[in-house]
Image (tube, rainbow, N blue to C red):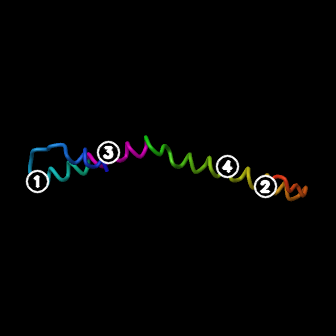
Amino acid sequence: MKLIHDSWANKVVDYPMFILQYKLKRLKIELQNWNKNSLGNVHNVVLLKKGLLFGIQQTLETASLFNIDGLLC
């Protein structure tokens, strides 16, 4: 909310429709930068998490083949 407030509070002098257009474009850029800086590359994070999940599934399948109950604690 602070990011939005700060972006919108900056003064722009021109025609009202130009001011609205300019503020929306500036806010879009600031939100994109915030998204990159706070969340990182979401696609890479999803791929990493899928890899971790696959590894866990493989471990559980291997454990069930050998009846190792200790891994399920």
Residue neighbourhood size for the residue with mark 1, other residues' Cα within 10 Å, grouped as few (<14), some (14–19), many (≥20): few
Amino acid type, residue under disc 3 in the picture: Ile
Q: Mark 1 sits on what residue?
A: 16
Residue 48 at what x, y percent from top left?
62, 46
Extent of the magenta region? 26-36
Query: On the rendered image, what quadrant is the C terminus found in?
Result: bottom right
Residue 71 at what x, y percent from top left?
81, 52
Rendered residue at 24%/51% (across/down)? 24
Amino acid type, residue under disc 4 in the picture: Gly
Residue at disc 4, secondary structure: helix
- Does label 2 or label 4 sit earlier along the sequence? 4
Amino acid type, residue under disc 2 in the picture: Cys
Q: Mark 2 sits on what residue?
A: 73
- Does label 4 or label 3 sit earlier along the sequence? 3
**Is-magenta flag for residue 14?**
no
- Does label 3 or label 1 sit earlier along the sequence? 1
Give the Cα distance between marks 3 and 2: 47 Å
Label disc, if present, on residue 29 of the rendered structure: 3
Q: Mark 4 sits on what residue?
A: 51
